[in-house]
Amino acid sequence: MVGKGSVNHNSRKFKAENVDGERSHLNIDYCNEPIKKIYHELFDEALKRYNEKQTRADRRIENYYEKIRNSKQEKPFHEMILQIGDKENMSAESESGILAREVLNEYYRGFQERNPQLKVFSAHLHMDEATPHLHIDFVPFTTGSKRGLDTRVSLKQALAAQGFKGGTRGDTEWNQWVSAEKSALAFVMERHGIEWEHKGTHEKHLSVLDYKKQERTAELEQLGAKIEEKQAEFNVLSERVLNYDDGLEKLRNVEEMLDNAPEYQLSEPQSFMSAKAYKTKIAEPLIQKLKALIKTALARCFEGWDNYHRLNITNGNLYRENEMLSKINSKLKSENENLRSEVKDYKLLRKVFGHKQIDELLEQARNIKGRKRENPRSR
């Protein structure tokens, strides 16, 4: 479920009537940062860049948090609440409740890594109410925005950056993300022997397939961005190598100038000029000019050779890294296609044979798997 969010209640700065204070010590407080501090960390630099571009004072933003708080399009933060079971089968005071605590704790430990665009500032696991549950409060943000602040609050764009692209009206970025997080939770539940019972629906859970497919999609997005970044570095370095080649051409021009330019040629002595005067007025100034030119040329040449050597090594490393990323990307695309095909086949089986028959077959398969786990010698 998704709530409006009450950070003070979550952190137990005040306690509601349904809170049992004698069990509050079993709660887990992961983090509880002031939201305004998070806004400063995330958006202050972008806000400064935005305001510097504004020529009209009325378009500058003094306080970004207050602007979002009063906005009709975005919320300052979002809260997600997760619970396994209910007070009948997962009471916080029972052994099952302790198991639920372990599952929710394990799920939360991977939340921020799975959701880099959702900055968590308050997270609490409650054991002092009827059923164990987890509150996660986060600020969704996007970077590289073309309008407004280049880093700004946007739930839609934050989820899109994590690979959730909106489709039909019921297949929004939010719904896709919630489904993926439920799958992540179900993935942890399955490792602890808890099965997700879908109430009010005939569609059985495809936790492992859906979760793996979503993970692959996110990995592909990250790899694509990484490849683009490496390609940009490769292009910059290639351009620098070309600049070095231009430098070599300029050195050749200097060589030709030394051979032919009049100012670098030793002129004939004037009539009645003594050897001492010729040396002082003509020969020595030319020699000093040539020495200065040679020193500059040698320094640039050695610097160019060193840079060229370093660039070639870096360029080679980038090329190999790019090749490796391309291979991984290709492999992940293939795995993702296979997962899509498996999900499609699964849904086709349900359509052809009916939900009830497939559910019965799955239940039989789970029972056989459970018996083998209990009696490993029968394998």
Image (cartoon, rainbow, N blue to C red):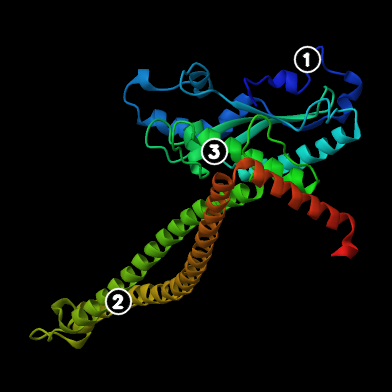
Residue at the far top: name it. 17
Label 1 – label 2 distance at C-alpha: 74 Å
Kindly identify the amino acid type of the residue bearing the numbered disc 2: Leu
Label 3 – label 1 distance at C-alpha: 34 Å
Q: Residue 89 in the image: x percent, y percent? A: 83, 30
Q: Which mark is residue 28?
A: none
Question: In the structure shown, which secondary structural element does the residue marked by tag 3 occupy?
Answer: helix
Kindly identify the amino acid type of the residue bearing the numbered disc 3: Gln
Mark 2 / mark 3, whichever is N-terminal? 3
Label 2 – label 3 distance at C-alpha: 56 Å
Q: Residue 151 in the image: x percent, y percent? A: 47, 36
Residue identified by numbered label 3: 176
Q: Which mark is residue 248?
A: 2
| Residue at position x 75%, y 46% in the image | 190
Point out the image quarter for the C terminus.
bottom right
Question: In the structure shown, which secondary structural element does the residue marked by tag 1 occupy?
Answer: loop
Q: Which mark is residue 14?
A: 1
Mark 3 / mark 1, whichever is N-terminal? 1
Mark 1 is surrounded, within 10 Å at the Cα level, by few (under 14), some (14 to 19) or many (20 or more) other residues, namely: few
- Name the residue nearer the viewer: 341 or 313: 341
Q: Residue 374 in the image: x percent, y percent? A: 89, 54
Seen in the picture, residue 139 relative to 6 is either above or below; the reply is below
Occupied quadrant, residue 58: top left
Can residue 96 be seen here? yes
- 185 vs 339, left or right, is right
Mark 2 is surrounded, within 10 Å at the Cα level, by few (under 14), some (14 to 19) or many (20 or more) other residues, namely: some
Can residue 110 be seen here? no
